[in-house]
């Protein structure tokens, strides 16, 4: 099994989040419900990462799965 996630897309996913709500970010890149987990990681070494919104507003979830600031985009897709 590869320890490298699949690139879902080479751009972030802008998502309107709600303060206090938790979101499960897909870390493996296999989910059909990007950027969120749908359980496609089962059988791999990957696990989703929980993100709890601190405030209402737009955040940018990583789509390339190479961010150093999981689960949010840090611009790593520009180097792929």
Image (cartoon, grey):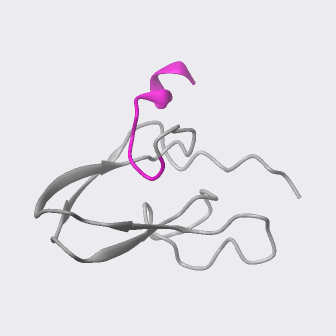
Judging depth in this view, the residue of 31 and 25 nearest the camera is: 25
Q: Is residue 70 above or below residue 46?
A: above
Residue 42 placed where, x, y %? 73, 78
Residue at the image point whose x is 59% and y is 45% from the top = 7
Q: Quadrant of the C terminus?
A: top right
Residue at the image point whose x is 81% and y is 75% from the top = 43
Q: Is residue 56 above or below residue 63?
A: below
Residue at the image point whose x is 62% and y is 63% from the top = 30
Q: Quadrant of the N terminus?
A: bottom right
**From this viewpoint, which residue is outermost toward the top?**
79
Residue 74 lies in quadrant:
top left
Judging depth in this view, the residue of 32 and 25 nearest the camera is: 25
- Range of residues picked out in magenta: 70-80
Would you say residue 79 sits in the magenta stretch? yes
Q: Main secondary structure of the magenta part?
A: loop
Residue 55 placed where, x, y %? 13, 62
Judging depth in this view, the residue of 48 and 77 nearest the camera is: 48
Q: Is residue 74 left or right of residue 49?
A: left
Q: Is residue 34 above or below residue 37?
A: above
Residue at the image point whose x is 68% and y is 50% from the top = 5
- Disc tally is 0
Residue 73 placed where, x, y %? 39, 40
**From this viewpoint, which residue is outermost toward the left?**
56
Would you say residue 9 sits in the magenta stretch? no
Residue 11 placed where, x, y %? 40, 38
Q: Is residue 22 left or right of residue 15?
A: right
Q: Is residue 37 left or right of residue 41?
A: left
């Amino acid at each position: 099994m590869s320890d490298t996630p699949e690139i879902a897309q080479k751009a972030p996913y802008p998502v309107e989040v709600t303060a206090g709500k938790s979101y499960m970010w897909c870390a493996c890149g296999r989910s059909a419900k990007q950027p969120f987990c749908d359980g496609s990681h089962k059988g791999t070494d990957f696990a989703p990462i929980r993100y709890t919104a601190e405030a209402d507003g737009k955040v940018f979830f990583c789509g390339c799965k190479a961010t150093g600031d999981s689960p949010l985009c840090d611009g790593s897709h520009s180097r792929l």
